[in-house]
Image (cartoon, rainbow, N blue to C red):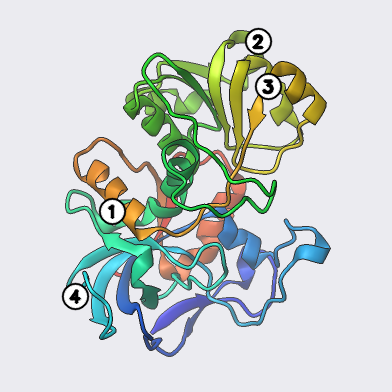
Amino acid sequence: MKAIQFHRAGGPEVLRYEEVPVPGIGPGEVLVRVHAAGINPPDWYLREGMKVMPAEMRPTLEFPLIPGTDLSGVVEAVAPDVLGFAPGDEVFGMLRFPGFDGRTYAEYVAAPASDLAHKPAGIGHVQAAGAPMALLTAWQYLIDLGHDVPSPFTGQVHQPVPITPGMTVLVNGAAGGVGHFAVQLAKWKGAHVIAVASGRHEQFLRELGADEFVDYTKTRAADVAGGVDVVIDTVGGPDSARLLTVLRRGGTMLPVFFAPYDPQETARRGIAVSNIQVRSNGPQLAEIGRLLDEGKLLVGVDSTYPLAEAGSAHARAARGHIQGKIVLRVTP
């Protein structure tokens, strides 16, 4: 089969389109013919050698590596102990995350059945492949964590804040993968949603349900928003702390990417800060799939690339300002 591999850490140019063996399947696994593979930040973190992590925490990588966690495709074979899936079933999922053995940038992949759900019939493989990691991240932050594993960043188990009608949720970086799903989930739960992104994304986010829009290139959210119940910040970085001022006392900050907060300031403001590391969860994807099938959630697709052009897809990701998800088309 064809797959994308890299033999050393580096930029998008290290991704190679190569011939590799079709994987075998073990207990609890199914063989999936991949039709589309979603691209996510951990894919380029891995490609870069996990430089995003402190040196003492970086895993030892054994090359060559096939990146990727997210897929949509068709079941080719199932292990004898697998129930609920059969050859010919359309499925989607996020494989073996947290971890580096998803290997979805390939024509075939051995997938744990527990990480898969039946693909919603109402959407195509490209949209389904764009959903798993980003949508599970938003779901596990806002709706249901689905496990009791402490966050590796805080040592605490995240407790989602029940979102009810009348609450206000601000989403920073609202046009990106996690952001555009967070907007929709908060709106689905009845919240008043403030979306923060660059101006070119306003129509996209309004169509997804945003009640208010802040163009951060012209206006700081902290200057125009206040009394917010929940902030989900998909941007992170040193500027994230500015968003603490928009939260009401008793509000919650949910940083998707690392951001420093002064614990004395958050305590003084009565603000809770909580984060997660998204984890594979087939049953949650099945629940999410019903919402996708009913049209209650939509998958924004920024761009698609053939599998052989994965390097170009990673270069697109590096340019930023993504609207929705970048997806690889594996099967034409």
Residue 332 image position (x, y, % from top left) = 28, 67
* Residue behind mark 1: 286
| Residue at 48% from the left image edge and 53% from the top image edge | 147
In what element is the residue under mark 3? helix
Tell which circle, 2 or 4, labels the residue nearer the N-terminal end.
4
Residue 100 appears in the rendering: yes
Q: Which mark's residue is nearer the viewer, 2 or 3?
A: 3
Q: Is residue 102 above or below residue 31?
A: above
Residue 153 image position (x, y, % from top left) = 69, 49
- Name the disc covering residue 223, or none: 2
- Name the disc covering residue 57, or none: none
Q: Which mark's residue is nearer the viewer, 2 or 1?
A: 1
Amino acid type, residue under disc 3 in the picture? Leu
- Where the N terminus falls, by quadrant? bottom left
> Horizontally, is 169 left or right of 259 in the view?
left
Amino acid type, residue under disc 2 in the picture? Asp
Residue 220 appears in the rendering: no
In what element is the residue under mark 4? loop
Tell which circle, 3 or 1, labels the residue nearer the N-terminal end.
3
Q: Quadrant of residue 162?
A: top left
Residue 263 image position (x, y, % from top left) = 78, 30
Name the one closer to the observer, 298 or 10: 298
* Residue behind mark 4: 86
- Name the disc covering residue 244, or none: 3
Q: Quadrant of residue 185?
A: top left
